[in-house]
Amino acid sequence: MKTYSLAHNLKLIDVAPPIPGFEKFISVYVLKAKKVALIDVGPSVSVENLMAGLGELNINPTDISYIFATHIHIDHAGGIGKAIKQMPNAMVVVQERGRPHLIEPARLWEDSQRALGERALKYGAIEPVPQDKILVVKEGMIINLGEMKIEVLSTPGHASHHLS
């Protein structure tokens, strides 16, 4: 795990899952304004590194207001269910098509194992996200972090439900 300062209010945590060759491969962006937001969390196996990175940045997990899921592939969002347990004030921001897979991830997990094989097992199983912790967003919605606002953009491509 390593943290980087990209700008005054933009940090990056390299959550480096404990998989050989995956160093500098999976990162979490941290937007720090009046409210704190994370862009993705990485896979379940990386949540401990995420928490360590937040500690290094002097951010208490209880201060996280939003977790943006750019898409629900397990290398980006597989750890949300595990992470949200330590972030009781956070809402998970996701596109409508991703919502049911976060609430009940069994099918996503099965599909991930089928597509990724052993790599899915190394990323770790997906834990469900409580339904009341999910904020479904659409193109053009604005999330206000205080000194910073995030406009939700639908950017299908890598995944049909991708947000930027």
Image (spheres, rainbow, N blue to C red):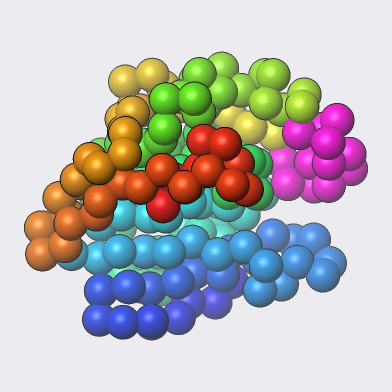
Instruction: Look at the picture and state if 147 lies above or below 144.
Output: below
Instruction: Name the quadrant containing residue 84.
Output: top left
Instruction: Look at the picture and state if 40 lies above or below 78.
Output: below
Please state the extent of the stretch shown in magenta in the rendering: 112-124
Q: Position of residue 122 (x, y in %)?
A: 80, 47
Q: Where is residue 154 in the image (x, y as percent from the top left)?
A: 41, 43
Asked whether 16 falls inside the magenta stretch, the response is: no
Residue 159 seen from this side: yes
Taking the view exactly as shown, the residue that stands out farthest to the right is 118
Q: Position of residue 149 (x, y in %)?
A: 18, 57
Residue that appears at 41% across and 35% down: 94
From the viewer's perspective, is 15 left or right of 62? right
Instruction: Look at the picture and state if 22 lies above or below 105.
Output: below
Front residue of 96/10: it is 96
User: Is the magenta region chiefly helix, strand or loop?
Assistant: helix
Instruction: Name the quadrant containing residue 77.
Output: top right
Residue that appears at 25% across and 51% down: 151
Asked whether 118 falls inside the magenta stretch, the response is: yes
Q: Where is residue 156 in the image (x, y as percent from the top left)?
A: 53, 43
